């Protein structure tokens, strides 16, 4: 559920021209790949 909310918020920022689509894609990727590893201190593969 949180990913959907995050994606919706990023989309709203892109639509209002506050960030670029490329930046939004990079942030979304970080939210899925980097943040969980850093938060739970999981060793990266």
Image (spheres, helix red, strand yellow):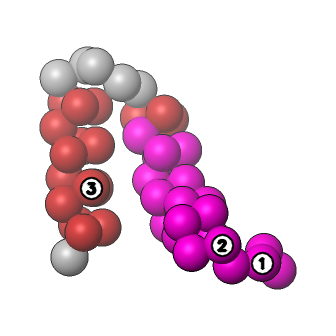
Q: Gap between marks 1 and 3, in whole Å?
A: 24 Å
- Magenta stretch prevailing secondary structure: helix
- The residue beneath circle 1 is 43
Q: Nearer the viewer, mark 1 or mark 3?
A: 1
* Left or right placement of residue 10 versus residue 36 in this view: left
Question: Which of the image's four quarters has the N terminus?
Answer: bottom left
Looking at the image, residue 11 lies above or below residue 19? below
Camera-nearest residue between 12 and 40: 40
Q: Is residue 31 left or right of residue 19?
A: right
Q: Earlier in the sequence, mark 1 or mark 3?
A: 3
State the residue lying farthest toward the top: 17
Q: Is residue 40 visible?
A: yes
Q: Is residue 37 above or below residue 12?
A: below
Name which of mark 3 and mark 2 comes first in the sequence: 3
**Residue at 68% across / 78% down in the picture?**
42
The residue where tag 3 is placed is 6
Q: Please state, as top left, top right, bottom left or bottom right, where the C terminus lies in the image.
A: bottom right
Q: Which class describes the residues within 10 Å of circle 2: few (<14), some (14-19), or many (20+)?
A: few
* Residue 11, picture quadrant: top left
Residue at the image position 28 percent from the left and 43 percent from the top = 10
Question: Is residue 29 visible from the viewing direction of this image?
Answer: no
Cα–Cα span, label 3 and label 2? 22 Å
Residue 21 in picture, x, y percent from top left: 41, 35
Q: Is residue 44 magenta?
A: yes
Residue, disc 2: 41
Q: Where residue 31 sits: x, y (%)?
A: 47, 58
Q: Which residues are magenta?
A: 24-45
Badge 1 element? loop
Q: How far across and down, in percent of the image, does residue 25 sit?
A: 47, 46
In the picture, measured across the screen, residue 19 lies left or right of residue 29, that is left
- The foreground one among 10 and 39 is 39
């Amino acid at each position: 559920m949180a990913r959907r909310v995050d994606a919706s918020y990023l989309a709203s920022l892109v639509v209002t021209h506050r960030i670029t689509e490329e930046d939004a894609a990079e942030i979304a990727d970080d939210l899925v790949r980097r943040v969980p590893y850093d938060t739970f201190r999981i060793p990266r593969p």
